[in-house]
Amino acid sequence: MIKTQIFHRKDIPNAVKMLQEDQLVAFPTETVFGLGGNAFSNKACRAIYEAKGRPQDNPFIIHIASLDRLHEAAMNIPDIAYDLFNEFSPGPLTIILPKALSISPVATANLPTAAVRIPGHPAAQALLQACPFPLAAPSANRSGRPSPTNAGMVMQELQGIIAGILDGDASIHGVESTVISCMDEENIALLRAGAISLEILQDFLSDKGLSIQIQTSSKELASPGTRHPHYQPAYPLRLVHQIDLPWLIHHHGHEKLGILCLFPLQDHDLNPPEGWQIKIFRNIEDFARQLYHALVEFEEQGVQIAYAQFPSRSGLGLALCDRLQRAAAQKSNP
Ligand code: TXA
Ligand code: MG
């Protein structure tokens, strides 16, 4: 066990010093919190896999402060990648590019490519600007668990395991970045749905006469990480198109149930059994922002089984459906 320090913005030089010594520091981003280590260092990158209990075939996203430092993470960069970064960064877009030689092969799980992102959260920006190297950073949870969207959730997952956490505002998106592969203009593919919607990317690309193929989980070339179990709480989660309160009361009246749904909840005037936890989100953005937090909070409240309403797959709904499906997947059958 090590003592996990909380860093505030004024302590960033100390956080950088720890990172220089190959220690790990979690930091906020606008999507979810990341677990950062020096992306040039094999030792730091090995420590990330270890801290998370992460399968070694699942590479990390490489975070940089700004486009003028892209050469630290990638090389042979096609013009379209610059266009996409110029339009959507800093922000929740990750682009797979040929990896720069200086990036640790441990960070990329020996792939010839690196996933590169420029986060916009002010605390992430301040840390990355102060770091003389890019930060390899997967989400700051133990492998397979819901991603943390505030510093307290990181503490719960990794206290005693990592050197520090940079404090900062909670993540505003609550789902991870959109991952696209973009080796050249003719081969642009969506590998993981995320906080920037497919429609927005399609609009941007179609103005240039280009298109994006969908290559998520079921397809061969998808992001390696999409093969592994993800985002799973301790209790079973079931997905339904509508929350049917009378049916749930009839079938689960004696259990501690959690419900995640969009406004309005039908039959909300029925009295749910004592101890049930019901979260009604105003819209899809709210649902995404609070999903992981709610999944973890239900654990603390002793929820035995949860039901979540499946939103429509348009806009941010595509990423939200993906995360819900993974969270609901059977642990024995990932
Ligand atoms: O919003 C986010 O993306 C957060 C914050 C911290 O930036 N990070 C995050 O990292 O979600 P992680 O490790 O939980 O997910 C990264 C995804 C994984 O599915 C991984 O397989 C994929 O990106 N990935 C990383 N490098 C890749 C590569 N070279 N080729 C294909 N997929 C890659
Ligand atoms: Mg993750």
Image (cartoon, grey):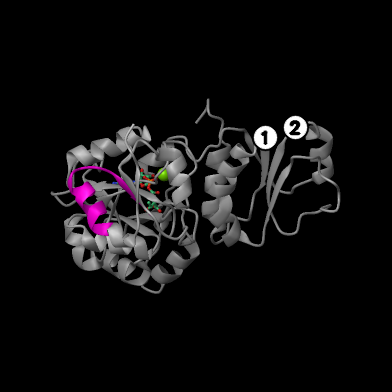
- In the image, which residues are magenta? 12-27
| Residue at x-position 59% and y-position 47% | 294
Residue 279: x %, y % from top left:
68, 51
| Residue at x-position 28% and y-position 58% | 11
Question: From the image, which quarter does the N terminus lie in?
Answer: top left
Q: Which of the marked residues, 1 or 2, is nearer the chain's N terminus?
A: 2
Q: Mark 2 belongs to which amino acid? A: Glu
Does 266 sit above or below residue 204?
above
Residue 156: x %, y % from top left:
46, 40
Does 255 sit above or below residue 311?
above
| Residue at x-position 59% and y-position 44% | 297
What residue did someone put label 2 on?
Answer: 255
What residue did someone put label 1 on?
Answer: 305
Residue 9: x %, y % from top left:
33, 61
Residue 13: x %, y % from top left:
23, 57
Q: Mark 1 belongs to which amino acid? A: Ile
Badge 1: residue crowd in 10 Å (few <14, some 14–19, many ≥20): some
Left or right of 207 in this view: 307? right
- The answer to which image quadrant residue 220 occupies is top left
Left or right of 68 in this view: 239? right
| Residue at x-position 56% and y-position 42% | 296
Is residue 174 visible in this depiction of the protein?
A: yes
- The answer to which image quadrant residue 112 occupies is top left
